[in-house]
Amino acid sequence: MSTMLVSKVKEKAGPLEGGRRLAIWLDGEVTKLFPGYFALVMASGIISNTLYLEGHRYLSDLLFGLNLVVFPWLLLLTGLRAVRASGALWADLTNPRLVFSFFTLVAASDVLGLGMNLRGLMDVALGLWLFAFAVWFALIYFSFAVLTFLNSAHNANVVHGGWLIAIVGTESLVILGAMIAPHQRELAPALFVLIHMLWGVGLALYGIFITLFAYRIFFFDVGPEDITPLLWVVMGAAAISANAGSTLILEESGVPFLMSMRPFIDGVTLIMWAWATWWIPLLVLFGLWKHGVRRVPLRYTPMLWSLVFPLGMYALASLRLSLAAEFGPLRAIAETMVWIALAAWVATAIGLARAMWTGLRGAVRAPALRPGT
C-alpha cells in the first residue's frame, strides 16, 4: 500500500518538477538573450522582400508570416529581460563589444516595415519607421558614449564588436523612409531631407569603421577566434548603403537641392555596391581558412544571422541598382544571390532548431531539483 502511494506521489511530482526545470531553463535563456538576435528578423525579412519583388510571392509570404511571429516574440523576450534580468541587459548595453548589436532592433523594424509597405500597409510601416528612428536616436549617442568612456585598449577591437551594425541600422531608416515619405503630404520634403542626411551619416560612419577594420585585419595577427559571422556585416553595411542610394535615386523627392545631388548619389552608390562585391570572395576565404585549414567546427551561433542578412541585402541591393542604373545584367546577380541567401537561411534555421531542441531536452532531463531549490 505504501509503495503504491509513493509511486503515485512521484507520478504527480514528475510533471511539476519537469515544468519547473523548463521554467528555470527559459528564465536562463531570457537572461542570456543575445542582443543581436533581431538579425533573425532582418535576415528573414530581407529575403522575403527580395523574393516579393522578384515575383515569388508564396515563399515571400511564408517568411513574412514567420517575422510576424518572431518580431513580437523577441520584443517580449527583450522586455522580460529588462524586467527580470536588468543587470544582464545593462551589462550588454555598456559593453563596447555588444552595444552595437542592439542596432539590429532598428534594422529589423525597418525591414519588417518594408514588408508591410510592399503589402500596402503604409500606416503600419510608418509606425515601425517612427519606432526604429526613436530607438536609433537613443542608441546612436549612447553607443558612442560607451565606446568613448567605457572602452579600453583590450576591448577596442572592431573585429569583435560588430560596430558596423550601426551603419546597417542607419541606412535601413533611409530605405523605409524613402518608401513612406511620398505619402506624408506637406511633411514629405522635410522627411526626404532627413533621410538624405541619414544616408550621409551612414556613409561617414562606414568610412571611419572600415578604416579601423581594414587596419586591424590586414596589419595585425588574426586567429580563428577573430573570424566570426559578424565579419560579413562589412559587406552587408556596404550593400545596404548601395541599396539606400539606389532607393534615393528611384524616389523623386521634388526638392531642387536634393535633386542636384543625384550625380553624386549615382557615383557613390555604384562604388559602395562594387566594394560590397569585392568583399564576398575574401570573406568566403576567411571562412575556409577557419573551418577548413584550422579545423574549427562549424556550430550554430546567433551571430550566423548576421551572415545571412548581408547575403539577402546584397541580392536586394543588386536588384535595386539594376533598376536605378537601368542595367539588366545586375538583375541576374540578384536572382542568383537571393537563392544562395535562402539556402543559408534554411541551414541556419536548422541549426537554431537543433540548438533549441538540445537545450530543451537538457533542461527536461536535468538532475532532480533538491527540495527548497
Image (cartoon, helix red, strand yellow):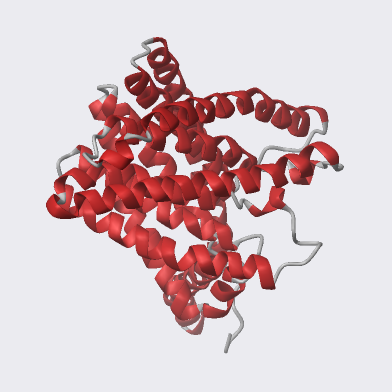
Q: Residue furthest right?
A: 221
The C terminus - image quarter: bottom right
Q: Which residue of the protein is positioned furthest toward the bottom in this rendering?
A: 372
Residue farthest to the top, as pictured: 329
Residue closest to the eye, 116 or 149 = 149
Residue 40 visible from this viewpoint: no
Q: Quadrant of residue 300?
A: top right
Give the residue displayed 57% in from the left and 49% down from the top.
205
Quadrant in which residue 277 is drawn: top right
User: Which percent across, then down, holds residue 29?
Assistant: 53, 65
Q: Is residue 207 above or below residue 275?
A: below
| Residue in view at x 49 percent, y 76 percent | 10
The residue lying toward the viewer, choosing from 284 and 317, is 317
Of the pair 189 and 349, the residue shown nearer to us: 189
Q: Is residue 143 visible?
A: yes
Name the residue located 52 percent from the left edge and 77 percent from the top edge: 85
Q: Is residue 32 above or below residue 317?
A: below
Q: Is residue 217 left or right of residue 335?
A: right
- Is residue 188 depicted above or below 323 in this figure? below
Query: 341 and 249: which one is in front?
Result: 249
Using residue 114 as the reference point, say whether residue 312 is left or right of it.
right
Say which quarter of the image contains residue 74.
bottom left
Residue 342 point in image, percent of width and height: 43, 29
Looking at the rendered structure, the number of numbered marks drawn on it comes to 0
Coordinates of residue 272 in the picture (x, y in percent): 52, 31
Residue 214 in the image: state x and y as whole percent.
73, 39
Q: Is residue 271 left or right of residue 224?
A: left
Residue drawn 47% across the image and 38% down it: 241
